[in-house]
Structure formats: structure tokens, C-alpha cells
Amino acid sequence: SSELTQDPAVSVALGQTVRITCQGDSLRRYNASWYQQKPGQAPVLVISAKINRPSGIPDRFSGSSSGNTASLTITGAQAEDEADYYCNSRDSSANHLRLFGGGTKLTVL
Amino acid sequence: QVQLVQSGAEVKKPGASVKVSCKASGYTFTSYYINWVRQAPGQGLEWMGIINPSGGTTSYAQNFQGRVTVTRDTSTSTVYMELSSLRSEDTAVYYCAREYCPAGSCPDYWGQGTLVTVSS
């Protein structure tokens, strides 16, 4: 099966813009969705190609994609955005399967 | 409102099996697939498998082939995930999540999670 690769950790100054990336061959064929997870909580969908931003997700969250890389951008990061972020897509090598990236820990300084 | 409510925490011995339930409400049960995802302590999300509640067809991640079985009961709008031959590495929080993107992957609503602890 394929893999989705994320940087383990990223930091951003309060109010600045940060991009979290996800790489994998599956992303050439399938859109990525993005999840935010805070300690002790279930993941929350923040971006998907079909829904874009679900209701209640601030518009500072946006997604984009190019080639084998998908990106989640937070424009004007807030303290409450500190969390783990995961990308997700179908597996292009076995398209009945799904994949998660390893996750990125975002620290807001 | 859409809700997925999972069964409570379990403690199992190595070699045993566990069956976790996920009861759906607030939408048409047979219209959306259900994913199972787990998260070991301090680790990332791991996709386990998926079921089409309409026909009952399933797909499983290679890591779990032969050990995981996902079933559904349409009369109660409940999906079940059974994991057998448990080992300590199966200690994790197990989540069910509704699949909103049938042509892709974007689970939108998640259960609250069920902690399964495997310990002798």
C-alpha cells in the first residue's frame, strides 16, 4: 500500500501563517482531507475537497494541492489552533483502502 | 443531529477478542459507509477498515487482514468491529467515523472513541 508523509512537528508565531504539508503518490489521484485533534478528543474534520470547510471551522483554515503534495494553511494562527493535524486520502494502489498521514504537531508560539 | 455513540472501555487479556459497537443516529444509516480507525497511546491515526451498511461489504487494511471483522445490524443502525488474537500492541482508542466522500475519503462525524486495553 501507499503512504502519506507529514513533518512530525511545525511551529508558528501567534498571528502568523503556517502551512502543513502531506506527500504521497495517492494525492496525484485523490484529494486529501485534513483533521485537527486535540489531546483526549476525537479528530475533527477541518478541510475536505467535497465539503471544503465544514460548518463551524474558521475561514483561516484552507487547503490546496499540487502534484503529490497536499497542504493545509492556517492564516493568522491562534493559540487554540495548537493541535495535531492529520491528512487522509484513499490509497491509489488499492483504492478500496484509506490512508492517514503520520500527523504533524503544531505549536503556536 | 448526526451522532455516533460507541460502547464503553474494555480490558482484555492477550489472545482474547474484543467487539466494539457504534450506534448511528440522525441520518439514514444505509446511506453512508462507516470507517474504523485506531490510535495507540501517543501515536497517530491508523485506518483499519470500512463497511457499507447497505450491503454489508467490507474492506480491511492489510495490517489487520484475518484479525478484524466489521459487521452491521440495520435494524438497530449499529456497526460492530471485532478484533481477535489481541496483543499488547492493540492497546488503543478505537474510533468509528462516518464516510462522507464515497469517491474519496473524508470521514466527517466521529464516535467518542473506545479505549481497549490489552494486558495480562
Image (tube, coloured by chain):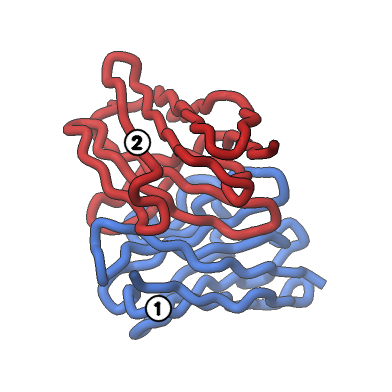
Chain colours: A blue, B red
Q: Are marks 1 and 2 in contact (CB under 8 Å)?
A: no
Q: Report the residue at 36% width, 55% height from top.
A: B61
Gap in Å between the C-alphas at discs 1 and 2?
28 Å
Q: Is residue B76 left or right of residue A8?
A: left
At 28% across and 26% down in the image, what residue appears?
A: B28
**Marker count (numbered):** 2
Give the answer, above or below, for where B120 lies relative to A44.
above
Q: For this rendering, which residue is in front, B93 or B105?
A: B93
Q: Residue furthest bottom?
A: A67
Give residue A6's quadrant in the image.
bottom right
* Location of the C terminus of chain B (image quadrant): top right
Badge 1 element: loop
State which chain disc 1 sits on: A
- Mark 2 lies on a secondary structure that is strand
The vertical placement of A93 against A42, above or below, is below
Q: Disc 2 residue type?
A: Val
Q: Amino acid at mark 1?
A: Gly
Q: Position of residue A52 (x, y in %)?
A: 40, 58
* Letter of the chain that mark 2 sits on in the rendering: B
What residue is shown at x 26% (from left), y 32% (from top)? B53
Q: Which residue is mark 2?
A: B70
Residue at the limit of the structure toward the left, as seen here: B55
Neighbourhood count class around disc 2 (C-alpha, 10 Å): few under 14, some 14–19, many 20 upward: many
* Residue B114: percent from left, percent from top: 58, 34
Image spot of residue A88 (x, y percent): 43, 62
Q: Nearer the viewer, residue A27 or B52?
A: B52
Which quadrant of the structure image shows residue B13? top right
Q: Are marks 1 and 2 on the same chain?
A: no
Residue on which disc 1 sits: A24
Seen from this angle, which residue lies furthest right? A109
Q: Quadrant of the N terminus of chain B?
A: top left
Q: How far across and down, in percent of the image, does residue A35 sit? A: 53, 57
